[in-house]
Amino acid sequence: MGLWDLVLQAGPVVKLVLLILVYFSLVSWAIIFYKFSVVQKAIKESERFLDFFWSKKRFDTIGQGVKDFSNSPLATLFREGYHELLQLRKKSVNPDEKSDFSVELDPTENVARALRRASTQETHRLEKYLTFLATTGSATPFIGLFGTVWGIMDAFHSIGQTGSASLAVVAPGISEALVATAIGLAAAIPAVMGYNHFLNKVNVLIGEMDNFSQEFLNIVERMERGR
Amino acid sequence: MESSRKQRWRQLQSVFEPGFSRMLLISLLLHILLPVLYFTPLFPKGEPLKPPVYRVNLVNKPVKNPQAGRPEAVATKKPAPPKPEPKPAPVKPKPLPPKPKPEPPKPEPKPIPKPEPPKPEPKPEPPKPKPAPKPAVKPKPEPKPSVSKAQENALQKRLEQLRKKAEQKQAEEDRKARLEALRVAAAAESQQIESPVKDAPVGMLDGKGDEAGVAAAEFVREYIQQQWSLSQYQISGSPEAEVLLFYSTSGALQHYRFLEKSGSSIFDDSLIRAINKSKQLNQPLPEAMEFHIVFNLKEMMDRR
């Protein structure tokens, strides 16, 4: 009896459980592919951006070239921080210009807030969908187990009705029921592996963002003191 | 800048990010492809395993018609000879005629011995011209004429009695033999009727004959199988090859040819090697025989 026969011969509840598991597997694999692409791009472009950042001495030059690093969270941080800095400069040059927002003129504080906000936003972007992987990894074995328990209940019920308890009667029902656990595990294992892998990569990127924020603030502070 | 922020916010809030639907499609294709691949030969499905068949050659003598392990198989051939025997059963009266027979023989033997003694009587006369050699013979005919007629009659009677006894004994033995044959026939018949397992498999391969032993074809196949060796990692599946083998009475391979090759040169070569090693069987065959054997890789792997 093949795997396909086992699925076809399963009861309606087990079939429903199998459908749910297939949905989880489908989406989690899509997330794995998507996250792989996003994280790889983020890491590569961040490395390139850091090289570009340290090779240039002027913020305006960097600001013009930052458009080439759209997938790098560090580039986003720089863009946000630089934008905030420009806003402050404009304010200090034209103090009469009306603004709805803060009029505080401590540039370091303002830039730090802007960087923190951008960092949070980037972290959310990088961590998006990872919760689904975590849910798949932890829930699908239980969903599969539920299908198995239900299938075994059904199998034993029908065995009780036939009155025969030979291995030939008991084994097919249990085998059908166990398919649900097997598919639950098949969905959970890649999801857990993917979740751990991407979480590690995202944590590395968060660390890089923190470091870059500190470096950026230091530069801003040095610039302000030098003025 | 404001638009860029808004775009990023929208992106965070959206269920499907721009590249995500493409990945979802890839994942869907993968999930469809996996079952499709499962049914292709790339993923060999576990064929239902044949339960192993164990053959035990208790009598390792190759015979033409091996006897089965059930009495029916023996009885199938035996009923034929005993049946004609029961027919003589009505011939039972035969023992009766022997009774009258002894009567007529009485006169018969009498005339026979009678002329005999007279013959020796004239014989003593001719010996006269040959005196030298006959003296030894002379005493013989002399005593005969000296035997009285009463003694002669007594001897004749005794001879008759002995003859009668011998005939009676013979008749008795015949009767016993017929009875025994009838008994065997009846036993075989009763076994045929009462056997609860009419269609049960017989004890030996091809077991339907009347000789105790193993089928010669099976013996040869087993012998070749013992000489055969092939690693399971070299070949898979279950290719089959049909081979025609000619063996002489002494068990020597005369020649062989492939009726159908398996299509796998590795398997065919392994068979040729095994056949070449089986050029001389360790037992003679009942007669020069031709064997048509189908070698199946899977069966051969299971057997060893």
Image (tube, coloured by chain):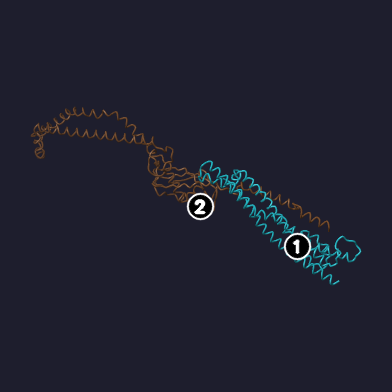
Q: Is residue A122 left or right of residue A87?
A: left
Q: Chain of mark 2?
A: B
**In terms of image quadrants, where is residue B96?**
top left
Residue B36 visible, this angle: no
Q: Position of residue B253 (x, y in %)?
A: 44, 47
Disc 2 secondary structure class: loop
Q: Which residue is mark 2?
A: B230
Q: Chain of mark 1?
A: A
User: Color of chain A here?
Assistant: cyan
Q: Which quarter shows the N terminus of chain B?
A: bottom right
Q: Is B124 drawn above or below residue A62 in the view shown? A: above
Query: In the depicted view, which residue is nearer to us: B92 or A86?
Result: A86
Residue at mark 2 shares a chain with residue at mark 1: no
Query: Alpha-carbon neighbours of circle 1 within 10 Å: few (<14), some, or many (≥20)?
Result: many
Q: Position of residue B292 (x, y in %)?
A: 47, 42
Of all residues shown, which one is farthest toward the right? A96
Q: In the picture, which chain is brown?
A: B
Q: Is residue A145 left or right of residue B147?
A: right
Amino acid type shown at disc 1: Ser
Disc 1 secondary structure class: helix
User: Residue placed at 79% from the left, 54% from the top?
Assistant: B10
Q: Tell me, for residue A46, which label it has, or none.
A: 1
